[in-house]
Image (tube, rainbow, N blue to C red):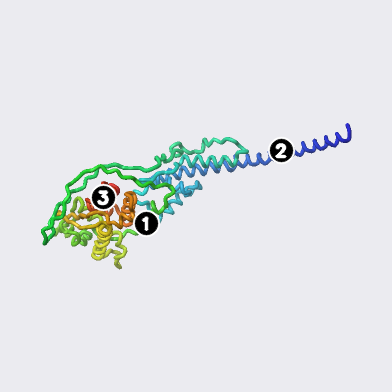
Amino acid sequence: MSAFRGILTGFGMAAIKDKEAKDNAKMEVVKAAGIDYHTNQLPEHKKMEANRASAYKQLTTILGSEEAVDFLDANGILVGDGKDVERVQKMLEDKSIKPGAFKDYVPTENYGERYKQRQTDFESRFDIVKKTFDMQGSGIGPSTINGLLTKPEGAMTTTEEVTTPAVEAEQIPGTPIMTSGTPEKTETITTEIPRTTADTAMSAFFVPKTSVPNLGKESDIAAAVMNYRGFDKGISYDPVTKTYNANFAGVKNTEYLALKQVINDIAPQFEMEDGKTNLTAAAEAADRQLEDQTQGFTSKIVSNFEKTTSSKGETGSTGGSFKPDFFEEFPTVKEQKKFLVDHMSKQLLSKSEMMYYALNFPSDVTFSDGKTNVRDALIAAVR
């Protein structure tokens, strides 16, 4: 062998040994990663997924809403550390779910899709250790994996039959003028439902809890409000039990419930030293507030607005159309509907207040398309 060939052979052997050393080192790294994968990472991952699934099930039962739990999971509040239920309950100590907040919730992805994505992310970290990874035996049942079924994207609608009560024609006292009456009518109303998703702000679903005011007995409330809004016609006094009893039906009952709700909302402002509510003062303030938020508000956006009262004491109103500046600011039917629905959802804090507002909207006013009745649309939106 020539000296030159010997040198080349030496270099070749060295290169082979160097590659073997690097391969051995790489295998040691892979081996160590594999041991860590099977000993620590995989068991921990399975445990977290099992914890997350368990919390998902428990919270669905506790909150009575899988949509609410889906929202929390999608926003990273469920992490699978075994403390998810405790964490959520702690978070909700000073918050509560708004009534019906999740009825129109549309998940952008369900629990199963988020689960699969977590598996993909986890597996990609250990591709060199194991190219494929089956999560069988993770302790997660198929019902949880499926999670909340994803609803169709896009607008959703609801259709229902709505009956509008008749409004009697009445003579304006001291004048020969008669208000215009309207007959009872039944229509099929189709309403677009606004969607909420996991990207919607938490404030849209959860509200701060408030202390429960001490309003006293139902008889005390009836006595406090009987001098307002013609309620005296439906409130009687029992001399034997010395109690006042309210007995209303239809629109008048909705109005009574709405006023009671406003009293409840503002009661903390009228709390006395003994912890009870000054119902006399609260009823007077509630009467003004309900007026401002309903007929008072409508009179600012509807021309020729007039309040009416039927022979049964039921309140209503008449009007011409939306004022020109309203149409200028909200030119489309969609914008007009949103403005009114926003007013109800933000200013009227209960369904009874919303329904009272809707029922008292002038029955002959339409949106800018000239055919969609505003009152009917509002009633459908509340229902």
Which of the two discs, 3 and 1, sits closer to the camera?
A: 3
> Mark 3 or mark 2, which has the lower sequence index?
2
Cβ–Cβ below 8 Å for labels 2 and 1? no
Number of residues whose C-alpha sits closer than 10 Å to that of mark 1, classed few (under 14), some (14–19) or many (20 or more): few
Distance between the alpha carbons at the discs numbered 2 and 1: 63 Å
Mark carried by residue 366: 3
Q: Which quadrant of the structure image shows residue 163?
A: top left
Say which of 233 and 46 sits in front.
Answer: 233
Distance between the alpha carbons at the discs numbered 3 and 1: 38 Å
Q: Amino acid at mark 3?
A: Thr
Mark carried by residue 318: none
Give the tally of numbered discs: 3
Which residue is denoted by mark 2 in the rendering? 23
> Mark 3 or mark 1, which has the lower sequence index?
1
Q: Secondary structure at mark 1?
A: loop
Which residue is denoted by mark 1 in the rendering? 209
